Image (cartoon, rainbow, N blue to C red):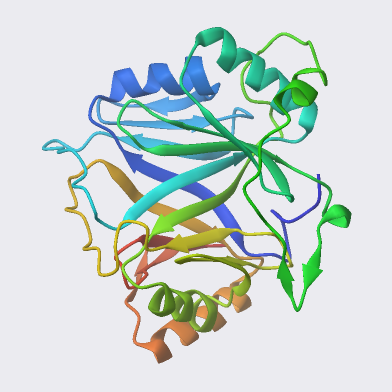
Amino acid sequence: MDHFHEKPNVYVGEVTIKVKNLDYAVTFYQNIIGFQVLEKTDSRAVLTTDGKTPLLTLEQPADVIPKPANTSGLYHFAILLPSRADLSVFLMHLLQTGYPLGAADHYVSEALYLNDPDGNGIEVYRDRPSSEWTWKNNLVEMATEQLDAEGILAENNAEWKGLPSGTVMGHIHLHVSDVKKAEEFYTKGLGFDVVSYYPQAAFLSTGRYHHHIAINTWQGVGAPTPPENSIGLHWYSLVFPNETERENVINQLQNLGAPIKRDANYYVTSDPSGNQIRLVV
């Protein structure tokens, strides 16, 4: 696996989503996805793959409501497995459970798609080596082709034991109200580069990854921000390599007029569609 999710890159570290029934959601994320519980209260569960690093947190708001249709927020968060062999084991596990899934070959990666019981989108994928990616005019070639499921399944016949410890949060894909406004925020504010376009969507990264963040208007141009107590994304974190780089980004966000506030050991901002981001070092 290439080193796109460590220094000096800026990458997604952790995602927090809201669910309707915490215990039910925890069971799904343990038994179907393969997370371990790091800590749990009556309204919150922190999930991990290595026993120490939080990757996904589930929250149950007291007055939680379903996510309204045609709003901004989470399209999916994407769990990156260390190897194709790991994807093989995960795919066989999913087929054995009978849980509904979709699949695609994106040239740069091979991906499986499913929804949690609340409709939160999940991608589980493996990257092809970056040496196999094709770049033209500083844009990486991506597509949606049929997945070679048989080839993946032939990679490994090991027993499924949950997500491997080398799993990371590979990227996040968001519904926004205006792609160009969001693109300005993520490039001029947060310092990401646009690396690919798709109809009504843009893909952004640091360090020439195929994408750490994707944005789309597939819920409609002008899609409003969902209520705070609705199922869906609460926040996600971006990990900076050092305090200097984070301070530079904070200055850029202030120059753009983006909201920014200090909270404990991180800063909080949100994109023009209300997707909340924690900036951590």
Instruction: Identify the residue shown where x is 50% and y is 18%.
Output: 32
Depth order, front residue of 241/183: 183
Q: Quadrant of the N terminus?
A: top right
Q: Is residue 15 left or right of residue 90?
A: left
Q: Quadrant of residue 180?
A: bottom left
Q: Is residue 276 left or right of residue 55?
A: left
Residue found farthest to the bottom: 255
Can residue 144 be seen here? The reply is yes
Can residue 264 be seen here? The reply is no
Instruction: Identify the residue shown where x is 24% and y is 54%.
Output: 70
Q: Is residue 71 left or right of residue 270?
A: left
Residue found farthest to the front: 146
Q: Quadrant of the C terminus?
A: bottom right
Residue 22 in picture, x, y percent from top left: 29, 25
Instruction: Identify the residue shown where x is 40% and y is 88%.
Output: 256
Residue 126 in picture, x, y percent from top left: 71, 39
Residue 124 in picture, x, y percent from top left: 59, 35
Is 202 situated above or below 21? below
Instruction: Identify the residue shown where x is 67% and y is 68%.
Output: 206
Residue 71 in picture, x, y percent from top left: 25, 56
